């Protein structure tokens, strides 16, 4: 009973935080609203077109994408941590986001230079190809070396290589859209429209449901591969599904928001501490919610701290996320002593 | 009826066969133990039975059904495992770990029913870890860990239990405790057990049948009585047979070589510590007259350079005494470890008297002093 009430409280906290941050994000910015004004605008009681546009064309899409993409990113981190049984695995640190960034930037520039603007679906596909490529490298390395630190270092290196190549491509692209591209490659939740959000939410929610349905074999896998097989898990299929899911999730995020650091590592860990469990059936929905809360919070800071100058989302998530990673490492060391 | 049997099974990694020609049958309530040197392939066999490795040849049958033709769920309902690898699950209590054994019985999302929780509690109680239910799995001792893992395996309600070196990290008390629990489980639940063990003495005591793995095959398959006889175990582990006692499965270290410097008048058991002490000091010694059925006999045979042995249940003969006196004369000191005198070892009295007469008799603690002079 005790456990159940803790889970309930956990979800309640996350949902409350999400609601509060949702409205905070709506009212704050270079144009400030009161809560009543926002509610009026939301329910169509206000006739001011510019106010309507600020809320419906700028803030609401941005909030929605931060919410969904944050959730997707954190979920992808949790899946990767489970897969590699490594607490600091995540799409960014393993170079998966950077791989996605590289391929989608290359594809984007290729078509832009021919005057074609890509739609969001093809952007996702190219990001997915990139993330699968990085993932492939990581899998080859993890198959050969079982050491946790080697895995992380290789991931970081892959990330650097991909970022370097992306930079080179961007340098030689020489296009008027480069400013846009640059913004995107730093990571941001702005610039999404409702069509993008449709794609984002369909992909994310389908993947979330898929991940949730996999929570049973995932819980077996947390006991180690040997025991998972003994419990009747089809391990090859399961691993393939897990890789596919996490790559798709991080590809989806990268395609729309660029690479966002530390959400994938920090949030699942914070959520596990909040709920006092690592059970996938709880942590999968919880880390999605947690990711949403975390990204709403970070995006709020990125937008408002030095307004009207906007920070890149990654610099904010890094400030809050990296201490968590250090905390994880210290905790792990302490347990070993 | 056999619950699990292997026919002409070959196992290995990749394409390389490590052990071939494995045949065994295990019935309900029976413990089959696999023994063999390090790297002989014991774990490989168990991993192949558990389907963690591809079977390279032959087949494993559960209740007459080829394991390859069974679904994962079907296999997991009839066979559970305790592996050597240490797991470090995150934020899991011992109760959570045991609960995971219910996996094959839960629904699509793995939510436990009341019955599942009941089975979990039962399994924990059976193994004596019910007090650990809410304790973090990473915060318990190795002995407790193994018991929790055993409870997990029981919770899976298998007919067959596979254990890979379940006692390896445990101290002697916990080794015995675990095997006692296992024995009890086998009896109560009528389980068939296949396990590998490094501890020969325990294998000898706990197993109903033993398979010995050597030179890439199941070299011998039999009851403990058949396996632990003659010099087979010494050959299996490539040891000097004189150093190994197959009654107790105990081995002595290498015998000090050279001309015997000390003669030990032996018999009764108190001498054993003296022989081992001399071995540690590297002093070659001779011993006698000792009976074949004396508790000291195996140790003397392993460690003494020269020995005078008397037939079991016969009094020490004049001939033996004469032989012992001759050896004694060549030594620079004599230690008497015998303090029980009876009809059978009366002859040793002569040895003691002679030693006293010539001033050879010393106390054990004076060995070094005496030898330095």
Image: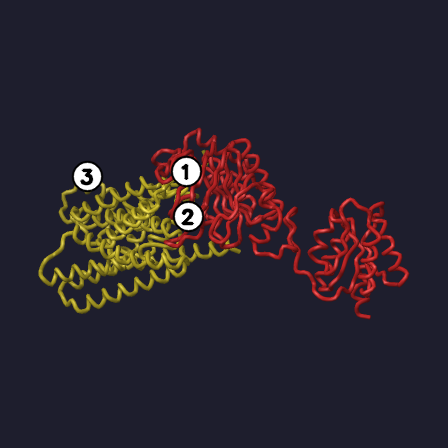
Chain colours: A yellow, B red
Q: CA distance from mark 3 to mark 2?
A: 72 Å
- Judge left or right: residue B351 versus residue B153: right
Disc 1 is placed on an element classified as: strand
Same-chain check, marks 1 and 3: no
Q: CA distance from mark 2 to mark 1?
A: 14 Å
Which residue is the site of mark 1? B61
Dot 1: within a 10 Å radius of its alpha carbon, few (fewer than 14), some, or many (20 or more) residues? some
Checking the image for residue A69, the label placed there is none
Same-chain check, marks 2 and 1: yes
The front one of A98 and B148 is B148
Closer mark to the observer between disc 1 and disc 3: 1
Closer mark to the observer between disc 3 and disc 2: 2
Which residue is the site of mark 3? A43
Disc 2 is placed on an element classified as: strand
Q: Answer whether labels 3 and 2 touch (C-beta < 8 Å).
A: no
The front one of B87 and B7 is B7
């Amino acid at each position: 009973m005790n456990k159940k009430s803790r889970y309930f409280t956990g979800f309640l906290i996350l949902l409350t935080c999400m609601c509060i941050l949702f409205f905070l994000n709506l009212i704050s910015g270079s144009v400030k609203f009161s809560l009543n004004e926002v509610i009026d605008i939301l329910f169509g009681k206000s006739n001011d077109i510019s106010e309507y546009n600020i809320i419906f064309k700028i803030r609401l899409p941005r909030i929605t994408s931060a919410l969904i993409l944050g959730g997707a990113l954190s979920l992808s981190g949790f899946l990767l941590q489970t897969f590699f049984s490594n607490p600091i695995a995540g799409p960014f640190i393993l170079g998966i986001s950077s791989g996605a960034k590289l391929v989608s930037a290359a594809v984007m520039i290729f078509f832009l230079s021919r005057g074609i603007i890509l739609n969001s679906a093809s952007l996702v596909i190219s990001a997915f190809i990139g993330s699968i490529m990085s993932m492939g490298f990581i899998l080859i390395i993890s198959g050969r070396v079982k050491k946790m630190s080697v895995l992380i270092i290789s991931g970081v290196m892959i990330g650097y290589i991909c970022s370097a190549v992306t930079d080179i491509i961007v340098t030689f692209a020489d296009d008027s859209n480069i400013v846009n591209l640059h913004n995107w490659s730093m990571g941001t939740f702005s610039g999404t429209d409702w069509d993008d959000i449709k794609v984002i939410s369909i992909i994310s929610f389908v993947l979330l449901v898929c991940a949730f349905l996999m929570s049973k074999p995932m819980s077996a896998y947390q006991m180690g591969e040997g025991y998972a097989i003994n419990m009747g898990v089809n391990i090859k299929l399961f691993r393939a599904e897990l890789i596919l899911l996490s790559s798709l999730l991080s590809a989806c995020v990268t395609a729309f928001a660029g690479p966002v650091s530390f959400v994938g590592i920090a949030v699942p860990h914070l959520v596990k501490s909040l709920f006092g469990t690592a059970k996938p059936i709880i942590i999968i929905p919880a880390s999605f919610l947690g990711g949403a809360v975390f990204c709403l919070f970070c995006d709020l800071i990125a937008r408002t701290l030095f307004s009207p100058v906007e920070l890149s989302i990654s610099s904010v998530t890094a400030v809050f996320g990296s201490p968590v990673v250090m905390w994880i490492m210290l905790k792990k060391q302490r347990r070993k002593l | 009826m056999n619950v699990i049997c292997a026919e002409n099974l070959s196992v290995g990694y990749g394409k390389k066969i490590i052990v071939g020609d494995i045949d065994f049958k295990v019935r309900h309530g029976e413990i089959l133990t696999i023994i063999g040197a390090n790297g002989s392939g014991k774990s490989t066999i168990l991993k192949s039975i558990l389907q963690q490795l591809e079977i390279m040849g032959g087949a494993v049958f559960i209740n007459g059904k080829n394991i390859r033709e069974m679904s994962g769920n079907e296999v997991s309902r009839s066979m559970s495992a305790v592996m050597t690898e240490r797991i470090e699950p995150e934020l899991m209590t011992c109760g959570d770990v045991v609960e995971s054994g219910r996996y094959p019985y839960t629904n699509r999302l793995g939510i436990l029913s009341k019955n599942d929780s009941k089975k979990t509690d039962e399994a924990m109680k059976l193994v004596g870890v019910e007090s650990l239910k809410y304790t973090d799995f990473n915060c318990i001792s190795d002995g407790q860990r193994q018991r929790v893992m055993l409870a997990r395996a029981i919770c899976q309600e298998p007919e067959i239990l596979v254990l890979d070196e379940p006692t390896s990290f445990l101290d002697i008390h916990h080794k015995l405790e675990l095997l006692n629990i296992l024995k009890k489980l086998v009896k109560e639940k009528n389980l068939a057990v296949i396990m590998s063990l490094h501890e020969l003495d325990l294998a000898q005591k706990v197993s109903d049948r033993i398979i010995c793995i050597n030179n890439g095959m199941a070299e011998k398959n039999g009851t403990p009585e058949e396996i632990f006889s003659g010099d087979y175990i010494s050959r299996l582990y490539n040891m000097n047979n004189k150093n190994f006692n197959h009654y107790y499965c105990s081995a002595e270290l290498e015998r000090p070589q050279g001309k015997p410097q000390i003669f030990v008048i032996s018999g009764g058991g108190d001498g054993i510590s003296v022989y081992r002490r001399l071995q540690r000091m590297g002093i070659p010694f001779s011993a006698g007259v000792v009976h074949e059925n004396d508790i000291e006999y195996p140790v003397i045979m392993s460690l003494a350079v020269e020995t005078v042995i008397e037939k079991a249940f016969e009094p020490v003969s004049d001939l033996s005494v004469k032989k012992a006196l001759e050896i004694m004369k060549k030594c620079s000191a004599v230690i008497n470890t015998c303090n029980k005198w009876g009809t059978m070892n009366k002859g040793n009295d002569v040895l003691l008297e002679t030693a006293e007469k010539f001033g050879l008799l010393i106390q054990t603690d004076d060995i070094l002093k005496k030898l330095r002079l």
